């Protein structure tokens, strides 16, 4: 079950939006690999890349928040850390049990739901704030 990018998820910052689109692409590739029951090594490799990309993307967002003294940055940082912890748990499960239907469901329900909700409810506020900083 793929997760689709929509313009409702756009935060209005081209860099962040492009990175979010890349995250959706990577999540969909991971879900497809699990659905196709690809080998554990392939799926773990994809998950490791996703993990690295998430760290890169969160780092970019966090630098922007710090540079612009975003008032909600600490709670936003905490949400990022929580997501990384969930991703680490998924990777550990994948490494020990291999790709399985229950991991696909877990990924879809937990991680993808989290990122969509996070983008809509948290990152969009960040994008709005960054626009006000550009106009100032």
Image (cartoon, rainbow, N blue to C red):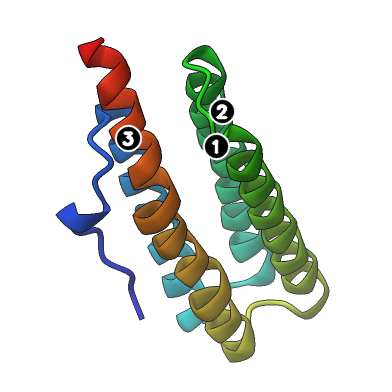
Residue under pointer 1: 72
Secondary structure, mark 1, is loop
98 shown above or below 91: below
Tell me if label 3 and label 1 are in contact, CB under 8 Å.
no
Whole-Å distance between the Cαs marked 1 and 2? Answer: 11 Å
Q: Earlier in the sequence, mark 1 or mark 2?
A: 2
- How many numbered tags mark residues here? 3
**Residue drawn where x is 58% and y is 45% of the image:** 49
Q: Residues within 10 Å of mark 1 (few under 14, many from 20)?
A: few
66 shown above or below 32: above
Secondary structure, mark 3, is helix
6 vs 101, left or right, is left
Residue 112: percent from the left, percent from the top? 47, 67
Q: Nearer the viewer, residue 75 or 2?
A: 75
Residue under pointer 3: 127
Image disc number at residue 62: 2
Whole-Å distance between the Cαs marked 3 and 1? Answer: 12 Å
Look at the image and tell me in which quarter the C terminus lies.
Answer: top left
Based on the displayed image, in which of its 4 quarters is residue 82 positioned? Answer: bottom right
Residue 125: percent from the left, percent from the top? 37, 43
Secondary structure, mark 2, is helix
Residue 11: percent from the left, percent from the top? 28, 41
47 vs 34, left or right, is right
Image disc number at residue 43: none
């Amino acid at each position: 079950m793929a997760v689709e990018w929509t313009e409702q998820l756009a935060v209005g910052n081209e860099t962040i939006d492009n990175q979010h689109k890349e995250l959706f692409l990577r999540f969909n590739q991971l879900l497809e690999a699990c659905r196709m029951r690809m080998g554990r090594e392939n799926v773990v490799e994809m998950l490791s890349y996703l993990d690295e990309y998430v760290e890169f993307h969160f780092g970019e967002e966090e630098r922007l928040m710090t540079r612009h003294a975003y008032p909600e940055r600490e709670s936003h940082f905490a949400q990022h850390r929580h997501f990384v912890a969930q991703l680490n748990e998924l990777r550990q499960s994948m490494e020990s049990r291999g790709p399985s239907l229950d991991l696909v469901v877990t990924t879809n329900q937990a991680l993808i739901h989290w990122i969509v909700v996070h983008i809509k409810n948290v990152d969009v506020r960040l994008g709005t704030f960054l626009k006000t900083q550009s106009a100032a």
